[in-house]
Image (cartoon, coloured by chain):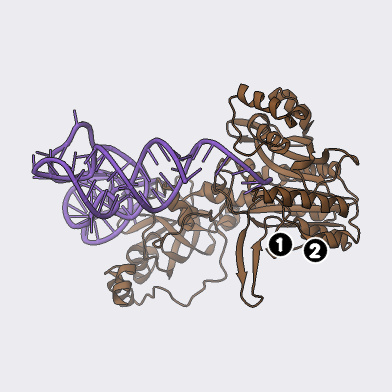
Amino acid sequence: MSEKRKELFGPEIDSLIKELEDHKTEAYPLIHFNDRDSADDIKSNFEQFEGKKVRVAGRLITKRLHGKAGFATMLSGGVKLQIYYRKDAMSEEAFHRVKKLISVGDILGVEGTVFKTRTEEITVEVQDAVLLSKALSPLPEKWHGIENVEVRYRQRYLDLLMHEDVRNVFYQRFKIIKAIRDVLIAEGYMEVETPTLQDIYGGALAKPFVTFHNALDQELFLRIAPELYLKRLIIGGLEKVFEIGKAFRNEGISLQHNPEFTIMELYEAYGNYKTMMSITEKIFDAICTHALNGNEVQFKGHTINCRPPFKKMTLEEAFQHYASVDIHQLCHQEYTREYLCKEEMRMDKPFSWANAVDEVLKKKVEPHLIQPTFLYDYPLPLSPLAKKKSRDSQWVERFQLVVGGLEVGNAFTELNDPVDQYERFTGQEEARSKGDDEAHTFDQAYIEAMKFGLPPTGGLGLGIDRIVMLFTGEESIREVLLFPQLRKREDI
RNA sequence: GGGGCAUUAGCUCAGCCGGUAGAGCAUCUGCCUUUUAAGCAGAGGGUCGAAGGUUCGAAUCCUUCAUGCCUCACCA
């Protein structure tokens, strides 16, 4: 116990607490310091506050001592506010407290008068100061902050504390999600929540996380997508629904992938993939207006105009234009082999039309799509939940929105024929039996639901994290997640 | 999982061809009543990621491992 205590707090902890108590100062007093003024308010409405008494609380982030006076900066509500204290404007006790007992990193509350220094900085001249919470660990270096990315992610609180630009990324994230939610509600969609623990996972092609429920004595999966539950709601008569939440995929971690990520899915009865294009454009328009204050973002060295309308291209056109290949011919193994050879590409997965199309799409087409582009009309084998373009077609009504080379959205006219759905599931099961562990599972309960009649429906999914990356110019998904997944470590 | 790079004081980083471990910030002690990366003078602070190996001698060279980043592959 005492060894652990010493290891955690160091040998000086007791003398520190004693020194505070000798000066009648508690390290963690029972004070919550209410009736505060906002630092942001004081700084943006200086004229109203000048000469007035204010109460402000925050964390001390720098201290500049000048003998019998001093300046310090506190971080209060995300805003930096300078405080000034001098010996002859406060009690002996209070002066000693600010000068000696309260150090950089501590949380304090001050009362004082607002003024401007000769360098025109808005400052509070302190009359009284109280320690609200003592910091036992020192803050990182004030100029460079933390540059070790691992420490930044593991101790995100320090990252946020030290780096205003990091705080801004997450404020932007909040504004983007709010803009999406607000526009959807304004358009008449109802926000819902569906299970993240599912006994059959589906709605995407991916490997799941597996867990176990003790009381039910059964395996459960963390959802890879909310899709199949949201479509049950459409069957249930909730005609316009959306959900913003986490999905979980047990796959690699990369600049664009985190095991858990935020997805927005919406479904609309009597809609199709064209109506999904139009709602997608409304969403991007709202983000530009409410979270960007403009039309353009800088991403990977490109200037991207995110204000709709967006370019539209069929997959066939895009393959012809960017890859000089006939998408239909990719179903012939020999043709595909020659093409891949010519382009110096290799395909790890077994040959099929779907895999060949996917390979060329990822390698040769999407990297060229910098400005927002709807790629539409997809091969059926890639899309087991989308509706065919006609009875015997090998094509489905589906689009993906690609921006900055990133897939940020995916939508289709939902497959609402239960017999066709049965056959698609059966086809996926065959693929699974041949070793494709990302094939869609056979979901009998979903087919039972479809037998009651799914209206013609359009559905859309947006990768929220990737959209945030785009609008904040961050090239790594970890920079837009507060706590990205890292390997477990004991110490921090 | 494959390949490349990194790991030195609390933080940010130097450390050349192998020869007793360095700076700035932070901390501590003085001085300093409009500074803002405040300043001046002084002090303390290290199992050089871990374990082996080569060597008279390793932060430095070699091997293995750990962690992170980048890159490749797949889902948004």
Chain bearing mark 2: A
Both labels 1 and 2 in a single chain: yes
Q: Residue A440: horizontal and vertical position, in percent?
A: 72, 52
Q: Which residue is mark 1?
A: A200
Q: Is residue A238 visible?
A: no
Q: Residue at x 76, y 46 (%)?
A: A283
Image position of A483 (left or right of A362): left
Q: Position of residue A180 (x, y in %)?
A: 73, 51
Which chain's colour is brown?
A: A
Q: Chain of mark 1?
A: A
Classify the position of the N terminus of chain A by image quarter. Answer: bottom left
Can you give x and y, in whole percent of width and height, for residue A270 in the image? 91, 50
Classify residue A312 by image quadrant: top right
Up/down of A203 relative to A402, above or below = below
Secondary structure state at the residue bearing disc 2:
helix
Give the amino acid type for the residue marked by disc 2 in the picture.
Answer: Ala
Q: Is residue A344 above or below residue A218?
A: above
In the image, A322 versus A453, the foreground residue is A453
Residue at label 2?
A445
Label 1 environment density (alpha carbons within 10 Å; few <14, some 14–19, many ≥20)? some
Q: Chain drawn purple, letter? A: B
Q: Quick one: SS at disc 1?
A: loop
Disc 1 marks a residue whose amino acid type is Ile
Q: Is residue A368 visible?
A: yes
Q: Quadrant of the C terminus of chain A?
A: bottom left
Q: Label 2 near label 1: C-beta < 8 Å? A: yes
Q: Nearer the viewer, residue A130 or A444?
A: A444
